[in-house]
Image: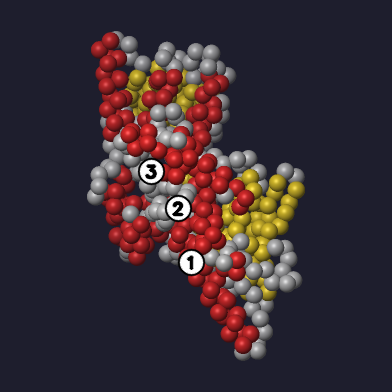
Amino acid sequence: MAQVRPGDAPLIHDLIGIGFGPSNVAMAIAVSEHNARVGRQEAITAHFFEQQPRFGWHRGMLIDDATMQVCFLKDLVTLRNPASEFSFLCYLKSRGRLVDFINHKTLFPLRVEFHDYFEWAADQVDGMVSYGHEVVGVTPVVRDGVVEYLDVTVRAGEGLALHRARNLVIGTGLRPLMPDGMERSDRIWHTSDLLTKVDALDGADPTRFIVVGAGQSAAENVAYLHRRFPAAEVCAVFSRYGYSPADDSSFANRIFDPDAVGEFFAAPPGVKRSLMDYHGNTNYSVVDVDLIDDLYRQMYREKVLGTERLRFLNVSRLTAVSEGPDTVRATVQSLVTEEETPLEADVVVFATGYRPVDPLALLGDVAERCLRDDEDRVRVERDYRIATDPELRCGIYVQGGTEHTHGITSSLLSNTATRVGEILDSLLDRGRKADADEVRTVADGTGSTAR
C-alpha cells in the first residue's frame, strides 16, 4: 500500500493520524509491526501530528502514589500481539525492573510508571510523529465527483504545510469539562491542572481547599492536597452520602472485554442504554475501595484527635463561586435542608470529568459527508470508521467519542490494543479491495482509478 504513483503530489500517506496520545501511539506501533512483517510493496506509509511539544498523557494527574485502574496486560500491544517488543513487560526489562515488579505482586502499576511506559513506547516510533504540529484543517480532494484523498493542513510555528492522505485516524483524546459558566484560573482548577499549578502554592500557606466531585480523580485530589499541605483544611463536596466503590469484580469487568465491544455494537438501542446503566459503576463517579477506606480512616482519626482538617460536605452541591484577588468565595447548599454554607478557600478544584473532542470539528466540508443517526450523533461502523456518503472513498477512523456505538471502552485503555488492530485490518482490507477494483477497471479498458 505504500507505493506512490507518478504525478502524485504532495506525497500521499496511506494513513495520517491526528493526535499522538496512547491510542495513536498504539496505532503507530501496529503499523510499525505490520511493516516489519511484510515486504516493501505491502508496507503502509503513516505519519502522525501532535500539537504538544512532546508526548504527554494527563500529566497533571500523575500523583506519585496513584495507581492505574487497568491491568498492566492491557497495555498498548499485548491483547493484539502478546509477543510484541512494545509490551509493558519489555519496558520493565529495559528499565531493569522486571524482577522487582514481579515480586511486587500487583496487576496495577503506578500511574507515573505507566506514563513512563507510554513515553518509552512513543520514543521507539518517534520517526512516525511530528510534535509541535497542529492540524488546523482537512479538505477533500475531488476527482470526477469522488473524494479520493484528504488534504491535511498542519501548522508548525508560523508556517503551514499540506499533507495528503488516503485515510485518517483521529485520536485527539478528551478535554476537561467544567460546569457551565465556570472558567479555569489560578484559583479555580480542574483536576487535570493539579500538578501543573500546585507548586505555585508552596510558601503561600494555603488554609482551605474545596474539591467538587465524587469520582476517582476527586478522591485522589482530596487525599493528595490533604497530604501535601498539612496545615490546610480540605473540603470534599458531593451530592451523595459518600464515595461509591468501583465494581472491579471479575464478572463486571467483562464489560471491558474485546468481545463485549462487538456485542454492544450489535445490540438494539434499548439494550445499549441498559448496559450503560448496569455497568456505569465500573467506571463513572466511582472510587477504588482502598482509597475510600483510607480517607474514612483519616477523617475518623482526626475526629478522635480533635484535629479535623478533612471535611466531607455530603448530600450537598456547590451553588456559587466568585474569585477574589487572594481567595475564592464559595457557597455550598445542602440538598436536604437547602441550608447554605459560605466557605472561603485558596483554591476550588472541579473533578467534573472530561468530554470527547468532536471528531468532525477539523473536517470542514468533509464533515458534511459524514452521516449521523436519529439523535444527531456521528455514525460509526464496527471497524471505528465514520459512516460517510458513497462519494467519499477515504477512511476516517476515530479513537474515542464512540461510546454510543461501541460502549464504555471508547475512551479507555482497556481495548486500545485490540481497537488499533481492528482499524489496521480494516484499512488493509479496504486498500486491497481498492487495488482489485483498479485492476479490473484497467483490464476493462475504462481507465485507471487511483486509491
Return the x and y of residue 143 as percentages of the image width and height: 68, 74
Instruction: Check disc 3 and give the amino acid type.
Output: Phe
Query: Which one is nearer the viewer's eye here, 142 or 53?
Result: 53
Q: Image check: 326 left or right of 330?
A: right
Give the quadrant of residue 449: bottom right
Q: Which residue is mark 2?
A: 84
Give the quadrant of residue 139: bottom right
Callout 3: few (<14), some (14-19), or many (20+) C-alpha neighbours within 10 Å? some
Say which mark, if any, is on residue 325.
Answer: none
Return the x and y of residue 172 as percentages of the image width and height: 54, 49
Query: Which one is nearer the viewer's eye here, 294 or 312?
Result: 294
Q: Residue at x 53, y 74 (%)?
A: 432
Say which mark, if any, is on residue 426.
Answer: 1
Instruction: Check disc 1 and give the amino acid type.
Output: Ser
Residue 332 seen: no
- Distance of mark 2 from mark 1, alpha carbons? 21 Å
Q: Nearer the viewer, mark 1 or mark 3?
A: 3
Return the x and y of residue 89 as percentages of the image width and height: 41, 44
**Looking at the image, is mark 2 or mark 1 earlier in the sequence?**
2
Q: Quadrant of the C terminus?
A: bottom right
Q: Residue at x 72, y 43 (%)?
A: 157
**Looking at the image, is mark 3 or mark 2 earlier in the sequence?**
3
Q: Nearer the viewer, mark 2 or mark 1?
A: 2
Q: Nearer the viewer, mark 3 or mark 2?
A: 2
* Residue 123 against residue 417 in the figure, above or below: above
Q: Image check: 15 left or right of 424?
A: right
Q: Residue at x 29, y 10 (%)?
A: 306
- Secondary structure of the residue carrying tag 1 is helix
Q: Which residue is mark 3?
A: 72
Residue 133 seen: yes
